[in-house]
């Protein structure tokens, strides 16, 4: 950050021998950059130079397309160009011919449910099915028109009819805006969405409320019109005959004083399925009642999704609403009615029955407020006044579906600074980097910044000298990611993109379907006899001396389950064939006979605690004799962390406010963009080369060597780049690479294994769920300041079926349980629960976030009981310089900056003014609320196992002046290779473009440490610097001789 202190930088103090340089950089948010720098494609030079599509091609009528079925492709493909052709095909094939547009539902059925069809019919070139029209009476929407086209037409129709007439069109456009993603909307269709009859569909309730109908056609019976209200007949069932096709939908325009609003509640704003969706419609008319003018409901439709097996109309509530006065009293009376009519049973799929039921009433109230507000703008002159809505209730009219999504933005300012040992001039004419000559560090000029933004990201034009390039600070400056252009153009090559070597085969995992259970028999005869199958490999096929056991801490896991399965999804074997489809079919053809479960299955922390299932044989504070995976293997994951006074004596003091409770945090899936992938290739010397998507090159290297009983020198593990890792590829890639290597070694051919997303998620584990049981105490001192007194906590984590890294994850949770606060008496104990789920593993923060958030929950609990603002409790109890943390680290003077950062951020961000503004807003708005949160964080980087805090680098300098670096770290998008190249460029005084990292490989840098713990830039940057210094030392005589 530069240590700018109060001069606009961060809270770091500026060392006395560090000089602050002018012209500090401003780093803006992505949204701000896009708003400032994005240029539409149509306005670019590329668009101007792009050749026009020949008119002959535009006018050429494409013929019907037919791709017949084949032995390896059992489903035929038809793409007719007329409705008659489509209906003839449907009449011939019936239910065996599936119509596809976006194919998302069909793909799920084929991939995950093993449902296939004899033929797929693509109607995207049938004019009647893709045409959309805004007519005088309503919208005609082609059943197979892309949703993006439907959305555009509805938007245009809504704008063309600004009054009530355009209400239905605007409602459809509003709901479609948040339907899936842009990519999905560009291919998916309204017909496909309605025909699947999803109970949580967004568009079915919208069309139901609008009174839509559809046109279906068959070759035998012609066309018929079906009201949408009678089309969905049950869960995933519709009134469509096997030979029929949906041709189009008709959505009538609304009448005067008719209002339609769609609503949706989801966990995310974009690209997420609804918890509950609905669309509500009322038609109002003026009337006289009790001597005054009122508005009366002449018609109503209340359609909901997510409350029943199908989308439903609240018919009873709508009947009660018709004829009612449209005012707050009537709506309040109807809220219990609609919630009673649509009550979600307590055992309904999807859970949250009370919440989902409440949303039905909530949406109706929001609709009343929104409609009443709109009525004031569209009612004819002389009409009754709109219903009265309390000013505090007016915010209920706002719906995020209709609100524009604001672009997030912000700025981080930091000044340039020079630090001894890195960039500053040191005595004797040499920099600390070992480069001769004066190297004054100056801020980059405008021209230098422009040069740095050049095509290759180098510091100077090609051919310029190193001295010229050194005028721009290589280290400490912002540079493009070395592979940024490749990422954005799609040219970056990942493991699964590597060109297949000659004779390459594909692999698919054979996984356990029953667990915990013994494996009595495996029969792969049918699988091996299938066409294209090379072999199916199990534990019994490993080379003599091969070690099937694996694991980063304890070898309690098996590459191939042998004799028993501990969790569903555990790998039993791997099928190898000449195609992915054949390998998958072979894996599914393997017959596995399971015995009875040897113990009741345990999936949750609560169940594990009740059963005493822990990796170290502990149960809370008591020792038990549980054996199999814990004490029998010598695994210990129970750790105690104590500091300060005796905990019992601390709680015995008088005048304390004591709270007890339980805090839970769930798991999380890594969901890296690139699933686990590996390419293993035998070498001619009896070894094997493994290219995998892994954060742990050395772990993969050692696991493969042990599994195949090969000398480590004959195994090469390498990685070019990963499509994300987040800790999930630190250890869990080992069994994937080992299985792939075993297959390649057995069949003596290159083998590629790429886990499909569901296989990856069902096999690899994720973030550890935690349960924290705590008792905490605080008091007010003589001045009334709230002070923490004691904390006693018991932490449980769900480690899964095998230990993996659960022990160190629990350690880090314990080390972060104090966060930034001094507890005079501190006692925490953590144990890892053993369950029958895939083993959980490293994940961003590695247990730290679980400990931190538990601490903040405890402080909030204490603050509530003490009746003090949580921030006052936080600020009054932060560590001070010289304090010792529970694990012994002393916060040295000048290195503990959180209190100062807290104070400066409160002032600079005007937190109190923001809070006052939020409080004023909340007082004026009953239903919309705002808030400001501010939390300190103390997170320790580096590995808790100290020996792992090391790194290695190999640097080559070629005669043309370019530099090749290979280091032990791996690139997963975080820019590690770029930063290492910056270090080398600075050290040698060459342009950044002259430095290159090809890949990370065990034959270049041996015994490397996983890229994790927020420390890789420090480790591998300094290892690279050390190598560069050694090379510069060797070159010194030559440089002196040449002058």
Image (cartoon, helix red, strand yellow):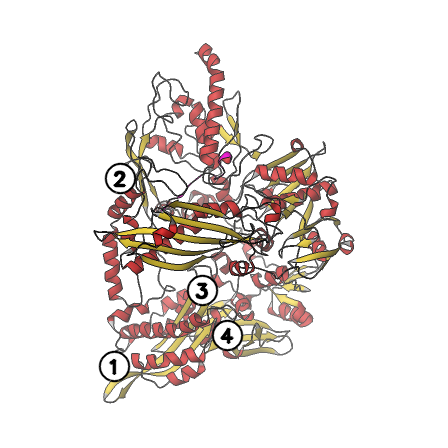
Q: Secondary structure at mark 4?
A: loop
Residue 37 in the image: above or below residue 591: above
Callout 4: few (<14), some (14-19), or many (20+) C-alpha neighbours within 10 Å? some
For marks 4 and 2, the one nearer the N-term is 2
**Count of marks, rendered view:** 4
Q: Which stretch is magenta?
A: 937-947
**Residue assigned mark 3:** 176
Within 10 Å of the Cα at label 2, are there few (<14), some (14-19), or many (20+) other Cα atoms? some
Q: Is residue 391 above or below residue 73?
A: below
Given contact means CB atoms under 8 Å apart, are the residues at marks 4 and 1 in contact?
Answer: no
Residue annotated with mark 1? 384
Q: Position of residue 83 (x, y in %)?
A: 60, 69
The quarter in which the N terminus is drawn is: top left
Q: Residues within 10 Å of mark 3 (few under 14, many from 20)?
A: many
- Residue 420 horizontal/vertical position (percent): 35, 26
Mark 2 or mark 1: name the one nearer the start of the chain.
2
Closer to viewer: mark 3 or mark 2:
2
Identity of the residue furthest to the top in this view = 1041
Q: Is residue 1043 above or below residue 814?
A: above
Q: Secondary structure at mark 2?
A: loop
Q: What's the CA distance linking mark 3 and mark 2?
A: 44 Å
Classify residue 53 as left or right of residue 558: left
């Amino acid at each position: 950050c530069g240590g700018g202190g109060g001069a606009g930088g961060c809270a770091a103090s500026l060392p006395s021998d560090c000089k602050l340089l002018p012209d500090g950089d401003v780093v803006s948010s992505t949204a701000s950059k896009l708003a400032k720098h994005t240029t539409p494609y149509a306005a670019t030079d590329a668009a101007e130079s792009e050749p026009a599509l020949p008119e002959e091609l535009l006018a050429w009528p494409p013929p019907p397309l037919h791709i017949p079925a084949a032995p390896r492709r059992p489903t035929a493909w038809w793409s007719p160009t007329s409705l008659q052709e489509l209906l003839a095909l449907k009449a011939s094939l019936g239910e065996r011919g599936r119509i596809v547009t976006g194919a998302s539902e069909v793909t799920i059925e084929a991939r995950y449910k093993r449902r296939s069809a004899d033929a797929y019919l693509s109607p995207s070139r049938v004019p009647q099915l893709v045409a959309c029209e805004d007519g005088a009476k309503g919208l005609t929407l082609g059943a197979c028109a892309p949703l993006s086209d439907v959305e555009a037409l509805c938007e245009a129709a809504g704008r063309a009819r600004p009054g009530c007439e355009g209400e239905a069109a605007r409602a459809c456009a509003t709901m479609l805006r948040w339907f899936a993603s842009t990519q999905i909307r560009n291919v998916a269709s309204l017909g496909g969405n309605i025909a699947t009859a999803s109970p949580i569909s967004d568009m079915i309730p919208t069309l139901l409320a609008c009174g839509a109908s559809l046109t279906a056609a068959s070759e035998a019976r012609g066309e018929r019109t079906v009201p949408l209200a009678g089309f969905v007949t049950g869960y995933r069932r519709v009134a469509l005959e096997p030979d029929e096709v949906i041709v189009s939908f008709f959505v009538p325009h609304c009448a005067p004083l008719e209002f339609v609003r769609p609503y949706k509640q989801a966990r995310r704003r974009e690209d997420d399925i609804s918890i509950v969706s609905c669309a509500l419609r009322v038609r109002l008319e003026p009337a006289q009642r009790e001597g005054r003018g009122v508005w009366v409901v002449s018609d109503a439709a209340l359609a909901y999704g997510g409350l029943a097996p199908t989308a439903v109309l609240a018919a009873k509530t709508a009947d009660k609403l018709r004829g009612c006065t449209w005012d707050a009293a009537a709506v309040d009376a109807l809220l219990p009615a609609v919630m009673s009519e649509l009550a979600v049973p307590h055992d309904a799929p999807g859970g949250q029955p009370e919440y989902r039921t409440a949303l039905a009433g909530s949406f109706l109230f929001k609709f009343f407020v929104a409609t009443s507000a709109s009525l004031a703008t569209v009612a004819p002159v002389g009409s009754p006044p709109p219903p009265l809505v309390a000013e505090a209730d007016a915010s209920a009219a706002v719906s995020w579906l209709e609100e524009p999504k604001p672009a997030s933005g912000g700025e981080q300012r930091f000044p340039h600074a020079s630090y001894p040992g890195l960039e500053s001039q040191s005595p004797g004419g040499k920099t600390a980097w070992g480069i001769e000559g004066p190297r004054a560090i100056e801020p980059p000029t405008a021209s230098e910044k422009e040069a740095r933004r050049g095509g290759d990201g180098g510091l100077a034009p090609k051919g310029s000298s190193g001295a010229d390039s050194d005028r721009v600070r290589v280290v400490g400056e912002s540079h493009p990611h070395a592979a940024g252009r490749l990422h954005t153009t799609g040219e970056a090559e990942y493991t699964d993109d590597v060109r297949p070597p000659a004779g390459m085969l594909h692999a698919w995992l054979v996984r356990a379907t029953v667990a915990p259970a013994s494996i009595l028999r495996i029969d792969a005869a049918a699988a091996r006899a299938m066409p294209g199958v090379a072999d199916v490999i199990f534990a019994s096929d490993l080379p003599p001396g091969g070690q099937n056991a694996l694991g980063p801490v304890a070898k309690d896991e098996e590459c191939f389950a042998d004799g028993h399965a501990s969790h569903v999804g555990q790998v039993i074997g791997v099928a190898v064939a000449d195609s992915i489809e054949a390998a998958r079919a072979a894996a599914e053809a393997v017959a596995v006979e399971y015995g009875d479960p040897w113990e009741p299955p345990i999936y949750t922390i609560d169940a594990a605690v009740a059963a005493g299932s822990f990796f170290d044989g502990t149960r809370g504070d008591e020792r038990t004799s549980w054996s199999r995976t814990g004490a029998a293997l010598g695994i210990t994951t129970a750790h105690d962390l104590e500091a300060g006074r005796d905990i019992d004596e601390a709680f015995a003091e008088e005048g304390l406010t004591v709270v007890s409770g339980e805090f839970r945090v769930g798991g999380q899936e890594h969901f890296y963009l690139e699933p686990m992938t590996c390419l293993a290739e035998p070498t001619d010397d009896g070894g094997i080369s493994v290219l995998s998507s892994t954060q742990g090159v050395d772990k993969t290297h050692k696991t493969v060597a042990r599994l195949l009983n090969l000398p480590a020198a004959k195994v090469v593990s390498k990685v070019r780049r990963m499509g994300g890792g987040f800790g999930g590829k630190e250890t869990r890639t080992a069994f994937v690479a080992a299985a792939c290597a075993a297959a390649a070694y057995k069949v003596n051919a290159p083998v590629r294994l790429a886990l499909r997303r569901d296989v990856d998620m069902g096999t690899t584990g994720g973030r550890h769920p935690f349960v924290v049981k705590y008792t905490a105490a605080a008091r007010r001192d003589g001045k009334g300041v709230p002070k923490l007194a004691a904390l006693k906590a018991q932490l449980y984590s769900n480690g899964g079926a095998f230990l993996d890294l659960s022990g160190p994850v629990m350690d880090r949770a314990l080390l972060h349980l104090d966060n930034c606060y001094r507890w005079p008496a501190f006692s925490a104990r953590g144990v890892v629960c053993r369950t029958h789920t895939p083993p959980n593993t490293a994940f961003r923060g590695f247990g730290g976030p679980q400990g931190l958030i538990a601490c903040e929950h405890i402080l909030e609990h204490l603050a509530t009981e003490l009746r003090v603002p949580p921030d006052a409790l936080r600020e009054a109890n932060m560590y001070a310089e010289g304090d010792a943390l529970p694990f012994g680290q002393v916060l040295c003077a000048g290195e503990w900056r959180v209190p100062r950062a807290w104070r400066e951020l409160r002032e600079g961000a005007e937190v109190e003014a923001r809070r006052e503004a939020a409080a004023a807003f909340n007082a004026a708005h009953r239903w919309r609320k705002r808030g400001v949160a501010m939390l300190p964080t103390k997170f320790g980087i580096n590995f808790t196992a100290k020996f792992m805090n090391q790194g290695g680098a190999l640097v080559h300098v070629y005669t043309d002046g370019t530099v090749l670096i290979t280091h032990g770290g791996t690139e997963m998008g975080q820019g590690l290779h770029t930063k290492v190249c910056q270090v080398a460029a600075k050290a040698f005084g060459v342009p950044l473009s002259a430095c290159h990292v090809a890949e990370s490989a065990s034959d270049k840098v041996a015994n490397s440490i996983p890229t994790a713990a927020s420390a890789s830039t420090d480790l591998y940057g300094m290892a690279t610097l050390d190598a560069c210094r050694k090379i510069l030392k060797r070159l010194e005589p030559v440089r002196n001789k040449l002058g």
